[in-house]
Image: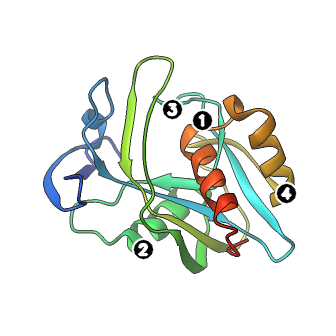
Amino acid sequence: MSDVDMVELVNDDGSPCGVAPRSTVHGASTPLHRAFSCHLLDDHGQMLMTRRALSKRTWPGVWTNSFCGHPRPGESTVDAVHRYSRHELGVDVIRLTPVLPDFRYRAVDASGVVENELCPVFTAHSVGSLDNNPLEVVESRWAPIQDIWTSVQATPWAFSPWFVDQMHHLHASGSHAW
């Protein structure tokens, strides 16, 4: 996953409208592009939270979902989820389930960098032991989902804005994905 990775730009209806280098799409006027988020769950009602590496361009050091990323042009979102799970956490995933297939968000971080993504959200289970990529993840923790929800409500500033929005959508929908 280098800066030469390309991302697919999309129109408001989700239809492709171009491509751009991943390194250039996140700025003050970020175009809408494809992405995804994935929440890893275990069989004990816990979710894996990760803390973004301090070197990340946007929201460095904040806690977020297990992993997220960008499908390459022409790559299925499912294939991208598998590619990123190995790259960021060193694990394969199984039981991949879409839970917010139409999730979309726009957020601006403290430096003015904009995230503007059509970002379906999945849950999955990991296979194997975690081996966090330090360029992506500074730390990770499994925690009970109810504890995470309580933390998101009490201290939303400690989490990525997309994760906070996802948790609110899942909680409001009474999602049984957990």
- In the rendered image, which quarter contains the C terminus? bottom right
Which residue is identified by label 4?
A: 146
Cα separation between marks 4 and 1? 25 Å
Residue 112 image offset from top left, x and y in percent: 41, 19
- The label shown at residue 56 is 3
Out of 127 and 110, give the one closest to the viewer. Answer: 110
**What is the secondary structure assignment of the residue under circle 2?**
helix
Q: Which residue is mark 2?
A: 78
Q: In which quadrant of the rendered view does residue 4 lie?
A: top left
Q: Secondary structure at mark 4?
A: helix
Q: Nearer the viewer, mark 2 or mark 3?
A: 2
Q: Is residue 114 left or right of residue 127?
A: left
Q: Which numbered circle lies on residue 53? A: 1
How far is disc 1 from disc 3 in space, using C-alphas? 6 Å
Earlier residue among tags 3 and 4: 3
Asked if disc 2 and disc 4 are in contact, CB closer than 8 Å, the reply is: no
In whole angstroms, how far apart are the C-alphas of marks 3 and 4?
A: 28 Å
Instruction: Return the x and y of residue 9 as percentages of the image width and height.
Output: 21, 50
Q: Which numbered tag is attached to residue 133?
A: none
- The structure residue drawn at horizontal position 62% and vertical position 73%, both measured from the top left corner, is 124
Kindly report the distance in space between the C-alpha atoms of the residues bearing marks 1 and 2.
Answer: 24 Å
